[in-house]
Image (cartoon, helix red, strand yellow):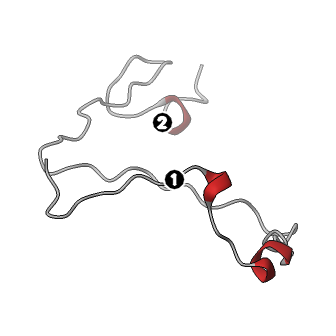
Amino acid sequence: MTYCEEIHPVPPEDSWVVPLDIIEREISPPYVDPSKPERRRYKRCRGVGESFSTRKNKCSVYRDFDHKRTTCPNRNTP
């Protein structure tokens, strides 16, 4: 991969020319409301070529593939 223009390296930090008003400026961290939860996590979107899982739920009580233990129709029967 190439670039159409030259990329110049950044000089060392001690050779930078920074104005005095910027050096003296105090920067405070962003406000974070403590009552709000952290950012919401989203599931990754699958790509075009990726297939979905074909795994089926299996009931651990009756070993049936139509449902799982929490939704088992025979759960309360002995």
Residue 3 appears in the rendering: yes
Q: Position of residue 53 (x, y in %)?
A: 26, 35
Circle 1 or circle 2, nearest the eye: 1
The tag earlier along the polypeptide, 1 or 2, is: 1
Relative image position of residue 30 (x, y in whole percent): 78, 72
Residue kind at label 2, given as amino acid type: Pro
Q: Nearer the viewer, residue 62 or 26?
A: 26
Q: Residue at x 68, y 72 (%)?
A: 18
Q: Nearer the viewer, residue 60 or 53?
A: 53
Looking at the image, is 57 positioned above or below residue 44?
Answer: above
Amino acid type, callout 1: Pro
Q: Position of residue 67 (x, y in %)?
A: 39, 34
Mark 1 to mark 2: distance in Å?
71 Å
Left or right of 44 in this view: 11? right
- The residue at the point 35 percent across, 22 percent down is 64
Dot 2 lies on which element?
A: loop
Give the residue at mark 2. Answer: 73
For label 1, the crowd category at 10 Å Cα-Cα, with few meaning under 14, some 14 to 19 and many 20 or more, is: few
Provide the residue designation for mark 1: 11
